[in-house]
Amino acid sequence: MAEYPPFAVTADLVVLTVRADELAVLLVRRGIPPYEGAWALPGGFVGIDEDLPDAAVRELAEETGLPEPAGHLEQLGTYGHPGRDPRGRVVTVAWLALLPDLPTPVAGTDAAAAEWVPVTKVARDRLAFDHDRILADGLERARAKLEYTPLAAAFCPPEFTVAQLRTVYETVWDTRLDPRNFHRKVTGTPGFVEPVGRSTEGDRGRPAQLFRRGPATLLHPPMLRQHR
Amino acid sequence: MAEYPPFAVTADLVVLTVRADELAVLLVRRGIPPYEGAWALPGGFVGIDEDLPDAAVRELAEETGLPEPAGHLEQLGTYGHPGRDPRGRVVTVAWLALLPDLPTPVAGTDAAAAEWVPVTKVARDRLAFDHDRILADGLERARAKLEYTPLAAAFCPPEFTVAQLRTVYETVWDTRLDPRNFHRKVTGTPGFVEPVGRSTEGDRGRPAQLFRRGPATLLHPPMLRQHR
DNA sequence: GAAATAGTGTCTTTGAGACAGTATTTA
DNA sequence: TAAATACTGTCTCAAAGACACTATTTC
């Protein structure tokens, strides 16, 4: 392979969760140059014998301290502008992860400096490298995917109420949805959610049925934002 | 950069067009090992100082023999399984291109062996490397995007009729659409198409208005396949 | 009981799909 | 004139949005 130009390849992660009614992204403070002290997306170099998804899963586990995240992980895109890393030619494969709010505080191997930051508080053009752009693309992808896939449930624990699911939509889209129409829509869309058979207890108001994710991968008809 | 694992990076292209009422993909016959003699997606190595989209545009120009393709080009995904290329660790960034049927036969620098192959005639598991998977992903992406974006027009020349646009949908989705409802839908969706003011001449039947692409980037409401 | 939250019923409007019917060309 | 294709009108049905109403809990 000596005849081909040598690149370094990294895996960077846009890890999103919904906590305290805000959409938050996992960021780390860089401890070494370049961009020392700046916020960045978590990530790292891909091993020469490591598959790309494996590298993403490994980084996610290292940063969140959780072995199997139970959320959703998908490839977001690849960013490789020649000047994006002052150390040389580094191409990064970016991944989008959607996780339920983690009860355990983030504390893994590399996770000392990792923090959940509400996306509204991420200062413009303040992330290292081209991570602003990657984060923006990840947010756009997540918002779009809530419309036509059941991925909102990836932000929820294994069992959740319709109201919890609605909060996810309202938080990610920053809108209000009619609870009654939302309920009919979610329970009426085949394969979106499945009743567990039990209900919540101890909360204010009438107990709510618990649901888990259904088998659908695509929602028909889709959930609608009002961009019309 | 000596401390980081060295990868080779390639750009591979899924180039689609609609010709003779069939969806066709541009394939090349490999002239050198590995996979010598097998069909493959067009592509090649990314230069060490070359931006990723530039590499895709360059490969597209080389393979189609056209300088500015006027169609659509977007990143499809990145494929980097350790065993995918026997020459070593090669990560490929795959791109999806949608082009109008090219009046000029394919004949560029590297294009001697390039051919349009109807996607229905691409034998399963017969492409080099993991190009079967990449092609399948490209087809799925193209089919999905016709629903909620105006990208069908990328398969048409700069000026086209509603019937031409409908043929694109029917070909890519392999369905029949009602010409009358399709006409109302397309002309009634804001920003999808704009009337040029002229009409076709010389064809059988009533002349059809010519349209060009409108400014919309997302279709609301979307065009619908009957997957329900 | 009041307040809160879950869930149902129903009305209105919008848009998709079916398809009759009209318009304008070529052969 | 017949055939072909472009386009319009209209009906029916499904689903979105508004919102009154009922159900079941905690305080």
Image: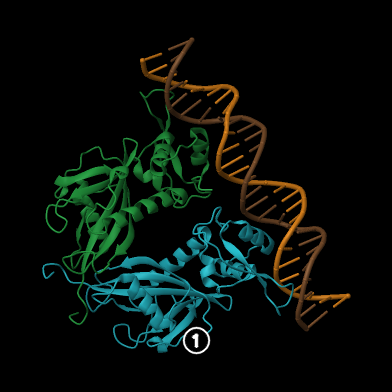
Chain colours: A green, B cyan, C brown, D orange
Secondary structure, mark 1, is loop
- Disc 1 marks a residue whose amino acid type is Pro
> In the image shown, does B226 or A34 lie closer to the viewer?
A34
> In the image shown, does A160 or A137 lie closer to the viewer?
A137
**Total marks drawn?**
1
Question: Which x, y percent locates residue A206?
Answer: 44, 24
> In the image shown, does C9 or B163 lie closer to the viewer?
B163
Residue sticking out furthest to the front: B197
Question: Which x, y percent locates residue B221?
Answer: 56, 53
Up-down relation of residue B46 to residue A26 (above or below): below
Q: Quadrant of the N terminus of chain A?
A: bottom left
Q: Quadrant of residue B190?
A: bottom right
Q: Is residue B41 visible?
A: no
Q: Chain of mark 1?
A: B
Up-down relation of residue B68 to residue A174 (above or below): below
Question: Which x, y percent locates residue A61?
Answer: 21, 50
| Residue at numbered disc 1 | B105
Relative placement, left or right, of B96 versus A4 is right
Residue depicted at x 51% and y 33%: A180
Q: Is residue B112 visible?
A: yes
Q: Quadrant of residue B107?
A: bottom left
Q: Quadrant of residue B53?
A: bottom left
Question: Which x, y percent locates residue A220?
Answer: 52, 50
Residue depicted at x 73% and y 77%: B204
Relative placement, left or right, of B142 versus D12 is left
Up-down relation of residue A223 to residue B71 (above or below): above
Crowding near the residue tagged with mark 1, few <14, some 14–19, many ≥20 C-alpha atoms within 10 Å: few
Residue depicted at x 25% and y 72%: B83
